[in-house]
Amino acid sequence: MKKFWFFPALVFLMVVMGIFVFINFNDTKTHIKEDIFNDTLKNVEVISSNIVKYINKNFDLEKLKKDEKLKLKADEYLESFISLNYKNIFIVYPQNKFFIALADGSKTERFDFKEKFKPLNKSKWNEVLKTKKLLYFKQDITGIWSTFLYPIIKNNKVKAILVIDFSTKPVKLVENSLTILKQNIEIFILTIVVFIVVLVGFTIYDYKRQKQLKKLVLELQNLNDTLEKRVKEEVEKNIQKDKQLELQSRMALMGELLSMIAHQWRQPLNALSAIVSNLKLDLMLGSFDKNELVKTVDKMENLIIHLSHTIDDFRKFYREDNQFVKIKISKIIDDAINIVLPSLKAHSIDLKVDIKDDFELKTMPNRLKQVLLNIIKNASDVLQERNIKNPTIKIEVKNKTIFIKDNAGGIKNDIIDKIFEPYFTTKDEKNGTGLGLYMSKTIIEKLNGNIEVYNDENGAVFKIELKDIDGDK
Amino acid sequence: MKKLIILFFIIFVNANEIELFESLFPQLFQKKEIKIYTYKYAKFNSSVLKKVNNCQSADIVLGEIKCDKPKFLLNYYNFKKDKKAIGAFYWRKGRPQLRLRKENILYYNLHLSKAFSEYLE
C-alpha cells in the first residue's frame, strides 16, 4: 500500500488546483466585468463631455430655460444620441425641491417644457451639484440600467446636470457567459477528479489482483515442484493399500477355504475312522487276516494320499504367484472346482461346467482361481440365503470368456453398479468384508482382462473376458 | 417617520402602488377607511381603501372622472391639465413621481402633513 502514497497526493493536488482555478476564475470574472463596465462608463463619459461641450457652445442655458423653441432644438440634438444602450438623455437644473427639465432627447415620454421632476436617489443628484463631479449609480440591484450624472458648469457653478440612463447589458451578457463557463469548468474538474479517483481505485484493485495472482503462481510452482514426489508417494500408498486389501481379501477367503477343507476332509477322515475301528475290532476278536490287512492298509494309504493332495491343492492356491505361466483354462477351472465342490455338495448346490473353448492363456493361475472362487462362493451364499429350489451354478467358457451364472434371482438394480466398489457388501459383518469382488475386479484388470455383471432371466451373470498378458484375446 | 414611509413606497411603488395610497390617503383625510370612486381598479384588496360605486359616497376620486370630490390623478398630462386635482402619481423616465397641490388640498380641508412637503408643488 505504501506504493500508493502518490495517488492521494495526486487527488489532493487536483483539489488544490481546482480551488486555485475557482479563485483565479472568480478574480478574472470580476476583472472582466469591471473592465467592460469601465469601458462602457468611459464611453458614456466621453459622450457626456462632448454633449456638454456642444450645449455650452451652442446654447445659452438661461435662454434655454425660457425659450420652448430652443428647447426643441436641444431635444433634437440629444435625440441623436439615443440608442439601445442609451435610453434617456436629458438635462435638468435644480429649482427648490425639484429639478426642471431643460432638454430631453427621449423619443417617448419626453419632458414638457419646464416640467418638474423629482429623481430617485436625490442625494446623489445634490452631491453632483455640490461637488461638481460626475457620478454614476445603478438604478436597481438586478436591473441592467445605470444612471450617469454629468455636471454642466459655468462660472465655476453647476448650472445643470446632464443625465444619461445607460445600459450595462454587455456586462450582464459577459457575466452570464462567464457563469456558464465557470459551471462547465467545475463539471470538467469534477469529472477529472472522479476519473482520477476511479483510476486510483482500479489501479489499487489491479495491484491487489496482481499480487494475489503472483501468490497463486508461486503456490502453483511449489505444487508443481513437489507434484512428482507427491504422486510417487500417493502411488506407493495406493500400492500398499492394494496389497493390504488383497491380503485382507485373501485372509477372508482363507476363512472360507478352511470351511471347504473341513468338507473335503470329513469324508476321508470318516472312512479312516471306520477302517481304524474295524482294525481294532478284528484285533480284539483275533480275526486278523493278513490279506485283508494289506487291502485295508492300501485303502488307508489312498485316503491319506487324498488328504495330502487336498492339502497340496490348498497350499498351491496360497502360494504367491507372481509368475505368468501358460495354462489351459480348464485346468484353472478344475482346480477351483476341486476346492469348492465338496462345500457346494454339502449345501446341495448343483455345479455345471460347460467348456466350449478350452483355450490356453498366459496368466497367473492362482489369482484367476481366487476370482473364480470368490464369485462361486458369493453365488453359493446367495443361493443358500434366498433358499432357492434346485440351486445351480453354471460355469460356461466360450470365446475366451468365462460366464458364471446362478439361478438366485439376480442382483437388485439399485446396487448392481456398486458391487465392485471396495467395502460394499450385502452380507453382515461376520460373513462379508466387501473386498471380494473389488479384489476380483482389480485382479482381472491386472491380468489385462475385463469383468462385468448383469442379470439374466434366472439370476446374476459374471462375465470375465480374458486376454493373454501379451494382449491377445 | 411618515416621510420615510412615503419615500419607501415611492421607491418601491412599482411593487404595489396601492400601498402608497394606503399610506397617503388616511394621512390626508385623517380617516382609517377611505372610500374611493375609480374606474381603474375593479376592487381594492385592502383594509384601508374601499371602492364605492358613485361619486357622492366617495371620499376621493381616483383618475379623470367628473366629480366634485377631491381628485387624485394617475397621469402627468391629466394632472397638468386638471388644475383642481389635489395630486397625482405617475411615472417619468422610469421613475415614480408623486405631486401634491397645496391650495387644492387646503380647499378640500384636507390635512397636510409635513411628511408631504417634499412633494408639494
Image: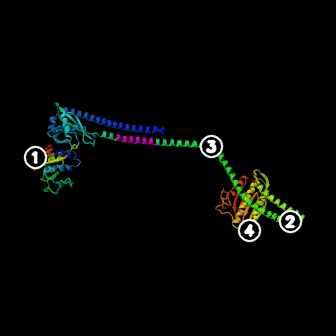
Work out whether residue A91 can be spotted: no
Where is residue A457 drawn, in percent x and y?
70, 66
- Estimate the spatial distance between the alpha carbons at disc 2 and disc 3, rounded to whole Å: 80 Å
Image coordinates for residue A294, horizontal then vertical, percent: 88, 62
Q: Which residue is mark 4?
A: A390
Q: Are marks 1 and 3 on the same chain?
A: no
Q: Which three-letter amino acid code belongs to the residue tagged 2?
A: Leu
Q: Which mark is residue B103?
A: 1
Task: Give amino acid for label 1.
Answer: Glu
Residue range highlighted in magenta: A178-199
Q: Earlier in the sequence, mark 2 or mark 3?
A: 3
Determine whether label 2 and label 3 are within 8 Å by CB: no
Mark nearer the viewer, 4 or 2: 2
Q: Chain of mark 3?
A: A
Where A264 falls versus B98 (above or below)? below
Q: Residue at x 71, y 62 (%)?
A: A379
Residue A231 placed where, x, y %?
65, 46
Foreground of the two, A224 or A205: A224
Dot label at residue A204: none
Q: Chain of mark 4?
A: A
Q: Which residue lies under the disc numbered 2?
A: A283
Q: What kind of residue is marked 3?
A: Thr
Check if residue A185 falls in the magenta segment.
yes
Q: List the residue tagged with mark 3.
A: A226
